[in-house]
Image (cartoon, helix red, strand yellow):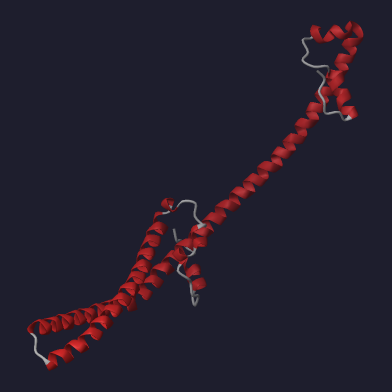
Amino acid sequence: MVGDKSDIYEQALAGKRVPVLTLDNNWYKLFTDLAELPRIQEKEKQLNELVQRQGQLNVDSKNIKKLKKKLMDEIVPMANELGQKYSKSLEKKLDEHKRLIEECNEKLEEYQDELMDLPRQIEQVNHALMLLTMSYCYESMQENTRQIVEIAQWVKNIRIELKKNLVRKQEMEYQNRQIYSYMHDLFGAEVIDLFDMQYDPMAVGQKKEDGSGNEKK
């Protein structure tokens, strides 16, 4: 989708802090159906997965910190108790707490490393999605403009044709009134049946003259 204008779009984005596009409902309003735009849909999915992963890691890190604090709070009195009186079960429990605390530290370190890299990944994918979005918007506006011009010309032509047909209609109505008037003078009111006429041309003409909108029954 990104064509020759990609360099121009890159320059426009230089130094700009672009918010995460998929977190903005207005971004979604640009598209009628993302399924018809596979490249944009692919980046949208990738970006959402990264954002969700970041959110999940933050939640998990918070929970692990809570667990670690709880274990640390419990380990101090256990160590004091064990120092006063040896207990094999207490020692085992203390060792288990230490193991769990070590696991917490490893997980927190692992999550921290990933959390430090995620903003870069999100920015990278978001940037690529912005380029695709700009290209899509440009192409959409160009196509819309082309159709707007076509429709405007069509409306103009229709108006011209409408005026021509209104003039032709008035001319034919006038001609019918002239014919009817002549034949009426010769044959009287039976001229309507004689010429198999659907309406009285004189009545139509009178309706136009007096401004009446009621058709003759």
Give the left or right position of residue 201, taking residue 93 as reference: right
Q: Identify the image quadrant of residue 104.
A: bottom left
User: Residue 12, how many percent across, how many down?
Assistant: 52, 71
Q: Nearer the viewer, residue 92 or 173?
A: 92
Q: Nearer the viewer, residue 94 or 109?
A: 94
Residue at image position (28%, 83%) is 69
User: Residue 3, how many percent across, how many down?
Assistant: 46, 61
Residue at image position (17%, 83%) is 98
Q: Is residue 140 visible?
A: yes
Residue at image position (82%, 10%) is 192
Q: Nearer the viewer, residue 114 or 41?
A: 114
With respect to residue 153, does 121 lie above or below? below
Residue at image position (88%, 6%) is 187
Q: Quadrant of the N terminus?
A: bottom left
User: Residue 202, how many percent across, how many down?
Assistant: 87, 19
Q: Quadrant of the C terminus?
A: top right
With respect to residue 187, does 79 lie above or below? below
Question: Of all residues shown, which one is farthest toward the front?
Answer: 85
Question: Of all residues shown, which one is farthest toward the right?
Answer: 185
Count of picture labels: 0
Q: Identify the image quadrant of residue 204.
A: top right
Q: Is residue 113 visible?
A: no
Give the left or right position of residue 117, taking residue 159 as reference: left
With respect to residue 152, does 47 lie above or below? below
Question: Of all residues shown, which one is farthest toward the left?
Answer: 88
With respect to residue 211, does 159 lie above or below? below
